[in-house]
Image (cartoon, grey):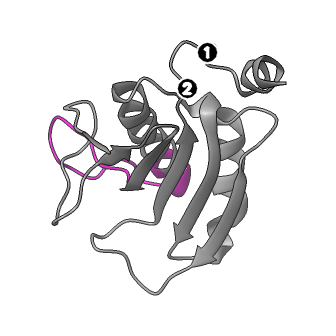
Amino acid sequence: MEEIVTDEAPESIGPYSQGMKSDVHVFVSGQGPVDPETGEIVGDDISEQTAQTLENIGAVLRAARSSLDQVVKTNVFVTDIDNYEAVNEVYGEYMSSPYPARSAVEVADLPIDIGVEIEAVAEYWPGVPSRRGNFYRARQ
């Protein structure tokens, strides 16, 4: 296992890593809409918050030599399920087909005052093109 650390995503706010890489997977800890440079919450609405959250996930994945295209599973936590469609719309702009498996749940609260947090698991295959479709064709 290898710890993933990058200045391109917010620092962890507790005793956990931004991400961990095994031989074939990258595990990205829950990310929220925090500007990595200032530490401030980004976005006045859930769409902006979701976009920044996914940018942060992408930064951790890039530091691990993976990408959003390699994501196979996400868990989405929202503080208001009425925001589900807005989160979905932005999520669909960042993720590509075949879309990752996903859970989405409403939670009473998150560690900081944000409306969305997302964690992800992605594949990591050195030397294989970064598109999920290419990986599967290469492995068949």
Could you tell me the amino acid type at mark 1?
Val
Front position in the image: 31 or 100: 100
* Residue 76 position within the rendered picture, expressed as x and y whole percent measured from the top left: 57, 63
| Magenta residues, start to end | 32-49
Residue 31 shows in the view: no
Dot 1 lies on which element? loop
Q: Name the residue rendered at 52%, 51% in the picture.
A: 120
Q: Is residue 24 left or right of residue 90?
A: left
Residue 52: x, y in percent? 42, 42
Q: Are marks 1 and 2 in contact (CB under 8 Å)?
A: yes
- The residue type indicated by label 2 comes to Trp
What SS does tag 2 mark? loop
Disc sitting over residue 125 in the figure:
2
Q: Is residue 78 magenta?
A: no
Residue that extends furthest to the bottom in the rendered view of this protein: 108
Please give the residue where the numbered disc 1 appears in the rendered image.
Answer: 128
